Amino acid sequence: MKYVCLVYADEYRLHSQPESPEDAECMAFSETQKAAGRVVGGEALEPIATATTVRVRGDEVSVSDGPFAETKEQLAGFYLIEARDLNEAIRFASKIPPARVGSIEVRPVRSLEP
């Protein structure tokens, strides 16, 4: 079963905390997990200042700068993984380096019905 692990962290404090992972640690973790066949895909994201939110209401398209909602933690990246079950996905998420300073949301991927 596929799960997405959404990495959330306070991007303003992320690199100022002593236990914050460096990019090299995150890249090494990702490469190790890809090589082991656990990661289907994933990426780090640019800061929220680069976000654009698009809404469609009826025939009207609205575009605004910034994320959809202001929160204490921002979406920093994601992993798409293959796991036997939720417990295995949680074990994977607990090893993601930014979990030390942020949080990881684990969510099953839903298949769309035709």
Image (cartoon, rainbow, N blue to C red):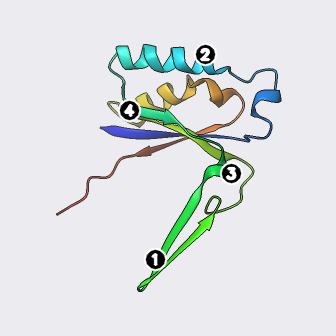
Q: Position of residue 80 (x, y in %)?
A: 40, 36
Q: Earlier in the sequence, mark 4 or mark 3?
A: 4
**What's the residue at 73%, 24% (across, down)?**
20
Of mark 2 and mark 1, the one earlier in the sequence is 2
The local secondary structure at tag 1 comes to strand
Would you name the residue on which mark 4 appears? 41
Near mark 1 (Cα within 10 A), the count class, few <14, some 14-19 or many ≥20, is: few
Q: Are marks 4 and 2 in contact (CB under 8 Å)?
A: no
Amino acid identity at mark 2? Ala
Alpha carbon distance from label 2 to label 1: 39 Å
- What label does residue 24 carry, if any? 2
Q: Quadrant of residue 67?
A: bottom right
Q: CA distance from mark 4 to mark 1?
A: 28 Å
The x, y position of residue 5, in whole percent, is 49, 38
Residue 58 place in picture, x, y as percent: 42, 86
Tell which circle, 4 or 1, labels the residue nearer the N-terminal end: 4
Q: Nearer the viewer, mark 4 or mark 1?
A: 1
Please state which of the two labelled residues, at mark 4 or mark 3, is closer to the viewer: 3
Gap in angstroms between the C-alphas marked 3 and 1: 22 Å
Q: Return the disc, 4 or 2, that comes first in the chain's sequence.
A: 2
- Residue closest to the eye, 36 or 63: 63
Q: Amino acid at mark 4?
A: Gly
Q: Which residue is mark 3?
A: 49
Q: Is the residue under label 1 in contact with that under label 3 (CB below 8 Å)? A: no
Question: Residue at coordinates 68% horizontally, 51% vertically from top-left?
Answer: 49
Secondary structure at numbered mark 2: helix
Residue behind mark 1:
56
